[in-house]
C-alpha cells in the first residue's frame, strides 16, 4: 500500500495501539474501537458488522483492507522497549566495545570454539568460507557458529584481540577483559564446555 502510494508510512498501521487511537479519532465509540483492535491484532480480521461500522464513520477502504490483512501486531510499548534496548546495546558496542564483546561471547559461549576463533582473523575467515560452502545444508549449530564468527571477525577488524586461554587466569565460563584484550574461559575449549558448566552451577 505504501509502495503503491495508497498510504504513507505515517498513515499505515504499525502497532496495535494505532488501530484503536485512529478509530477513536474517526469518532468510532471507544469500546468498538478496542474490540476491532483486539480482533485485528490477533489475526481474526473484521466481522461484516465491524466493516460496516467503520464505513459508517468514513474510515477509508484501504484502512479496512489493511486491517483484514494483518495476522499479528506488536503493542507500541513492546516495540519501543525493543528499540530502546537496541540503542543501549549499540551504545555499549561503540563506547565500551570490550565490555560488549566479553558479555556477548559469555552469553553465546555454547557456540564459541577457541580452536577456531582466538587465532586471528584469517582463521576465522577460512572457517566462515567453509560454512558458507554448505549453503542451505548448514545445521542449526553451524548457523550459530557462523553468527559468532561474524562478531569475532568484527572484533578483530576493530583492532581488538584475544589472549591465550590460561589455566590460572581464565574464568571457567566467562570471557574476561584484561590488558585491552579478552581472555576466553576454559569452557571455550572443545570438550571442556560441559564439565565447566556443571562445576560452575
Image: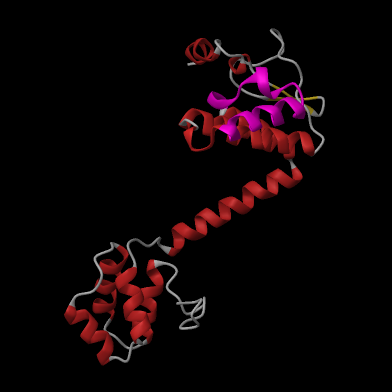
Q: What range of the chain is rendered magenta?
A: 109-133
Residue 101 place in picture, x, y as percent: 68, 34
Note whether 158 is above or below 76 in the view shown: above
* Figure check: 38 above or below 193: below
**The magenta stretch spans residue 116:** yes
Residue 29 lies in quadrant: bottom left
Residue 145 percent location from the top left of the image: 57, 29
**Is 97 covered by the magenta stretch?**
no
- Give how far across and how far down residue 115 sits, in percent: 66, 17
Is 175 left, or right, of 28 in this rendering? right
Is the stretch drawn in magenta largely helix, strand or loop? helix
In the image, is residue 44 above or below residue 199? below
Number of callouts: 0
Q: Is residue 53 left or right of residue 93?
A: left
Residue at screen point 37% across, 82% down: 62
Front-most of residues 149 and 10 = 149
Is 127 left, or right, of 68 in this rendering?
A: right
Q: Is residue 56 left or right of residue 95?
A: left
Most distant residue in the top direction: 167
- Find residue 176 and report its image quarter: top right
Which residue appears at 65% of the width and 32% of the height? 129
Q: Quadrant of the N terminus?
A: bottom left
Picture residue at 33% right of the left edge, 85% below the top = 61
Nearer to me, 97 or 154:
154
Amino acid at each position: 500500500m505504501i509502495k503503491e502510494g495508497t498510504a504513507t508510512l505515517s498513515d499505515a498501521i504499525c502497532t496495535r495501539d494505532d488501530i484503536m487511537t485512529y478509530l477513536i479519532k474517526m469518532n468510532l465509540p471507544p469500546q468498538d474501537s478496542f474490540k476491532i483492535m483486539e480482533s485485528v491484532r490477533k489475526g481474526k480480521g473484521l466481522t461484516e458488522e465491524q466493516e460496516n461500522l467503520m464505513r459508517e464513520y468514513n474510515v477509508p477502504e484501504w484502512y479496512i483492507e489493511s486491517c483484514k490483512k494483518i495476522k499479528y501486531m506488536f503493542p507500541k510499548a513492546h516495540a519501543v522497549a525493543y528499540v530502546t534496548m537496541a540503542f543501549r546495546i549499540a551504545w555499549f558496542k561503540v563506547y565500551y566495545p570490550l565490555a560488549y564483546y566479553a558479555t556477548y561471547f559469555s552469553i553465546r559461549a555454547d557456540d564459541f570454539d577457541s580452536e577456531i576463533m582466538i587465532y586471528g582473523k584469517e582463521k576465522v575467515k577460512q572457517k566462515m568460507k567453509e560454512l558458507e560452502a554448505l549453503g542451505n545444508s548448514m545445521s542449526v549449530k553451524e548457523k550459530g557458529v557462523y553468527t559468532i564468527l561474524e562478531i569475532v571477525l568484527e572484533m578483530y577488524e576493530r583492532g581488538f584481540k584475544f589472549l591465550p586461554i590460561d589455566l590460572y587466569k581464565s574464568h571457567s565460563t566467562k570471557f574476561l577483559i584484561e590488558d585491552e584484550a579478552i581472555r576466553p574461559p576454559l569452557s571455550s575449549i572443545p570438550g571442556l564446555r560441559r564439565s565447566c558448566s556443571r562445576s560452575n552451577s
